[in-house]
Amino acid sequence: MTLPQIVSLFSIAVLTTVAAVIGIQIVFLLKEVAHTLKKFNGALDATETAMKRFAEPVANMLAVVEGLKHSTKIIEIFSSYINKHGEPKPPITMQTPL
């Protein structure tokens, strides 16, 4: 074997070893990234649950307020109807003391 063949064979062996080590490190890195993403996903799920627990009572309170608004409008309409179509009220007579 000539010297260039030996150098080529040695360099191919070194490059193959380096590529294998880099590949193994990439696999470890991807496993760590997957583990970190699972933890992050769990934290997001916990945050979503907490926000739902907080948002539900607020939405119910807003529904109650909206219902009160509508009921006051109904009462106003009803009272204006009664005032327009009700019996006329007699005038107030004041008696003076003797």
Image (spheres, rainbow, N blue to C red):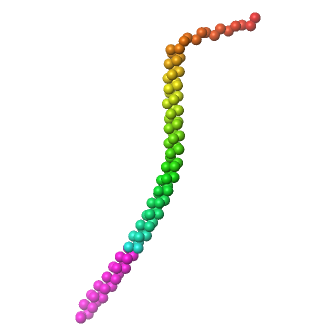
In the displayed structure image, the side of residue 94 where residue 10 appears, left or right: left
Q: Nearer the viewer, residue 42 or 16?
A: 42
Q: Which residues are magenta?
A: 1-26
Image x and y of residue 9, in percent: 27, 88
Q: How many marks?
A: 0
Overall secondary structure of the magenta section: helix
Image x and y of residue 60, in percent: 51, 41
Farthest residue, direction bottom: 1
In the displayed structure image, the side of residue 44 where residue 10 appears, left or right: left
Q: Is residue 97 magenta?
A: no
In the displayed structure image, the side of residue 96 where residue 5 appears, left or right: left
Image x and y of residue 59, in percent: 50, 42
Corner quadrant of residue 23: bottom left
79 is higher (above) or lower (below) than 95: below
Corner quadrant of residue 91: top right
Q: Residue at x 53, y 14 (%)?
A: 86
Farthest residue, direction right: 98
Q: Residue at x 31, y 82 (%)?
A: 16
63 is higher (above) or lower (below) than 28: above
58 is higher (above) or lower (below) than 88: below
Farthest residue, direction top: 98
96 is higher (above) or lower (below) than 79: above
Q: Residue at x 51, y 22 (%)?
A: 78
Q: For the N terminus, which image quadrant?
A: bottom left
Image x and y of residue 15, in percent: 32, 82
Corner quadrant of residue 94: top right
Q: Is residue 13 magenta?
A: yes
Q: Nearer the viewer, residue 42 or 18?
A: 42
Q: Residue at x 50, y 35 (%)?
A: 66
Q: For the C terminus, which image quadrant?
A: top right
Q: Nearer the viewer, residue 32 or 10?
A: 32
